Image (cartoon, rainbow, N blue to C red):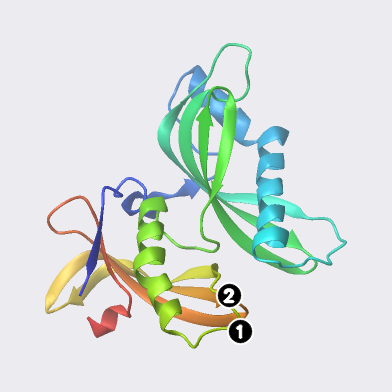
């Protein structure tokens, strides 16, 4: 049975149209200022610090790495147009999704963030690592309604540990017309998620399709070919 995540079409469905960083933004001073900000040291430092935080504090990766870390923005999607004030290079309003690679000690990982500009400050809100196409609301549904349930069904870890982290995501079937339940549906895709529960790794498959009745995404915690 497919489950529905409503009100996320802007963040989830539109991820199919992610464009490369150095995007073509709206014409005018705000668009030009935004392109400049996305290339700025201030923004690169923010991505760098977020990547280090996820590496060392959340996922506990490469904690002994002494080599230089490198950050590389890869894809970008504008969700709410930026606004700037005269003389301030940092946007005072705007929302966008940013995907970036963090390289260190012979390994490269992909992280994602939602950037929210407000009152001259840009707050980066981390999303799940990897190549998932899902937006924040959809990710929340997957975690609460599927990942947490699967974790609860696992053999209890030692002590009271129940901490579950998403460590990687990738698209196993790209968006395409697919037959589900005898009906051909456009833009169906499938993802694989890797999770860590108190040191025990497990994986889940998710099948996604546009909702037929309202804007949003229907999903099921299984392979698309099993639907």
Nearest the viewer among 185 and 95 is 95
Q: Position of residue 208 (x, y in %)?
A: 30, 67
Residue 12 visible within the image: yes
Left or right of 65 in this view: 153: left
User: Which residue lies at the image location 57% right of the left edge and 76% below the top edge?
Assistant: 160
User: Which residue lies at the image location 43% right of the left edge and 27% below the top edge?
Assistant: 26
How many residues crowd mark 1 within 10 Å: few (<14), some (14–19), many (20+)? few
User: Which residue lies at the image location 57% right of the left edge and 23% below the top edge?
Assistant: 33
The residue beneath circle 2 is 161
Q: Quarter of the image holding residue 66?
A: bottom right
Left or right of 93 in this view: 198: right
Looking at the rendered image, the quarter that the N terminus falls into is bottom left
Position of residue 219 relative to residue 222, above or below, is above
The residue beneath circle 1 is 158
Are the residues flagged by discs 2 and 1 in contact, CB closer than 8 Å? yes
Q: Position of residue 24 (x, y in %)?
A: 47, 35
Going by the picture, which residue comes out furthest to the right? Answer: 66
User: Which residue lies at the image location 67% right of the left edge and 41% below the top edge?
Assistant: 46
Looking at the rendered image, the quarter that the C terminus falls into is bottom left
Position of residue 47 relative to residue 90, above or below, is below
- The numbered mark at residue 117 is none
Label 1 SS: loop
How many residues crowd mark 2 within 10 Å: few (<14), some (14–19), many (20+)? few
Going by the picture, which residue comes out furthest to the bottom? Answer: 155
What is the distance, in whole Å, between disc 2 and disc 1 at their CAs? 7 Å
Q: Position of residue 41 (x, y in %)?
A: 72, 35
Q: Quarter of the image holding residue 144?
A: bottom left
């Amino acid at each position: 049975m497919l489950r529905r995540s409503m009100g996320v079409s802007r963040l989830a469905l539109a991820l199919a149209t992610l464009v490369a960083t150095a995007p073509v933004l709206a014409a005018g001073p705000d668009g030009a200022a935004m392109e400049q900000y996305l290339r700025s040291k201030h923004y690169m430092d923010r991505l760098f610090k977020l990547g280090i935080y996820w590496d060392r504090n959340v996922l506990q990766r490469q904690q002994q790495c002494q080599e230089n870390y490198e950050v590389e923005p890869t894809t970008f999607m504008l969700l709410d147009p930026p606004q700037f004030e005269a003389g301030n290079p940092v946007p005072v309003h705007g929302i966008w999704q940013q995907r970036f690679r963090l390289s260190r000690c012979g390994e490269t990982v992909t992280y994602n963030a939602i950037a929210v500009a407000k009152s001259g400050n840009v707050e980066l809100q981390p999303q799940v690592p990897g190549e998932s196409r899902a937006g924040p609301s959809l990710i929340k549904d997957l975690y609460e309604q599927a990942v947490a349930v699967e974790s609860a069904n696992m053999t209890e870890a030692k002590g009271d540990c129940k901490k579950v982290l998403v460590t990687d995501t990738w698209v196993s079937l790209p968006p395409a017309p697919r037959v589900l339940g005898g009906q051909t549906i456009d833009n169906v895709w499938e993802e694989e998620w890797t999770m860590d529960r108190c040191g025990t790794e497990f994986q889940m498959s998710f099948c996604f399709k546009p909702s037929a009745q309202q804007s949003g995404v229907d999903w099921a915690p299984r392979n698309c070919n099993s639907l």
